[in-house]
Structure formats: C-alpha cells, structure tokens
Image: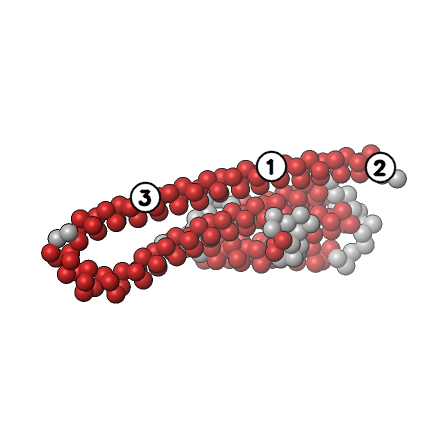
Amino acid sequence: MLTEEKKKLIEAEERYRHDIKIALSQAEHSTTVEIKKLASDIKSAKKTVVDKCISFFNTSLGMWFLSSILVTGGAATLQQIEHHYQDKQKNKALLISYQFEIGNRLQHMKYYLRHAKTVGDAKYALEGAFKSSAPISPEFQNLSLSALYFDLFQLIRGSIVPEERRAAMNLVLALENSEYLLRHQSDKAVLTDADKESLSKLISDIENSHLKDLKMIPD
C-alpha cells in the first residue's frame, strides 16, 4: 500500500512531467517559427541575389561572364549555399534537443534527490546519469550524460574554450562516478546529509556549466 509520502512524490512527478511536456511543446513551436523565419530570409536573400545578377547580366561584361564562368560553376555554388543553410537549421534543432534532454535529466535528479532519504532513493534519483526514463527523443534514452555533453560540445565547439569544456566534462564524469559508487551500497542504508548535499551541489554545478549563452558552430 502506498504511503502518503509516496503518493505525494508520484503526484509531484506527474506534475513535473506535465510541465516538461508544455515546455517542449513551446520549444518545438519556437523552433518551427525560427526555422520558417530562416527559410524566409534565405528566400529573400536569393531573390535579392537574382535581381542583382539579372541587372549585371544585362551588361556586355555580364554576358561574357555568364557564358565563360557562371554556367560551369554557378550551379554548384548555389547548391553549396543551400546545403549550408539546411545543415544550419538541422544543427540548431539538434542543439535545442540536447539542451532540453540534459536539462530534463538534471531537473529530474534534483527533484528526487531533494526528497531522498535512503541510498536506494539516491540511486533512483541519479539514474539519469546513464539513461532517461522520459527522453525528449528516443535516440537519447540510453545515452549517458557524458555522451550527451560530448555531442552537445560538437555543435558549439566554436563558442566554448577548451578549459570550460574540460571543466564541465569533469563534473559530469564525477556525477557518473558517484552513481556508480552508490550501486555497491545497500538500498536501505540511510543517505547522510553530507552525501546528499555533496550530490546536490554536483548537480547544480553541472547545471550552471551549460545551457548559458550556447551558440552554434560559427559559419
């Protein structure tokens, strides 16, 4: 039979999941709007280029340039530009997905660790270090936190210095190591205040090391 405390935890978890779904829905809408705006900007830019090209090609120099150079290389150049913007849109969507997946796991850990009283409770709270019980995307479910960070840093490698990247990864690896050490302890053992505080601080430090001023790979 569920105790009142367990019932409250379950209710709180359901509320948390509901809030996450709302946040994801808003993020998805925002991403869609941004992608549509980017597509519109690309279309506008293409129209401007075309208009200028037409004016240029109406000159004698333009006609010579068109016949001798542009016909052979222009199509390939335009295709490369289009692929570049497509990749940029895809990477931007991936960046948002990684941010939400990592943020979702960290919030889940913080919430359950805050209510943890035993080592078993702490183990459950830190499960997100190696897998996700409610992944943002199916391919994230069995990825460890360190793997998510590695992929995230590939997307933003031009906007974060190596020292900051190493510091963030060291924090994540420390959390994964803490979760591993808990596996060898009895679930019924009491979680000390010192251990609880140490784990909570580690999660907060990780949270503060990312999701702030992240930028895409420079063009």
Task: Name the residue carrying label 3.
Answer: 44
User: Residue at image x 78%, y 50%?
Assistant: 120
Q: Does residue 191 lie above or below 78 as drawn? A: above
Label 3–label 1 contact, CB within 8 A: no
Q: Does residue 2 lie above or below 209 as drawn? A: above
User: Residue at image x 51%, y 51%?
Assistant: 94
Tell me the quarter of the picture where residue 73 sits. bottom left
Q: Does residue 40 lie above or below 162 as drawn? A: above
Q: Is residue 163 left or right of residue 6?
A: left
Rendered location of residue 199, percent (x, y): 66, 48
The mark closer to the camera, 1 or 2, is 1
Q: Amino acid at mark 3?
A: Ser
User: Residue at image x 15%, y 56%?
Assistant: 62
Q: Between marks 3 and 1, how big is the CA–CA gap?
A: 33 Å
Task: Name the residue carrying label 2.
Answer: 3
- Inspect this view and state whether residue 171 appears: yes
Please name whichever residue, 130 or 61, is drawn nearer the observer in this view of the structure: 61
The mark closer to the camera, 3 or 2, is 3
What number is the disc on residue 22?
A: 1
- Inspect this view and state whether residue 205 appears: no
Q: Amino acid at mark 1?
A: Ile
Q: Between marks 1 and 2, how big is the CA–CA gap?
A: 29 Å
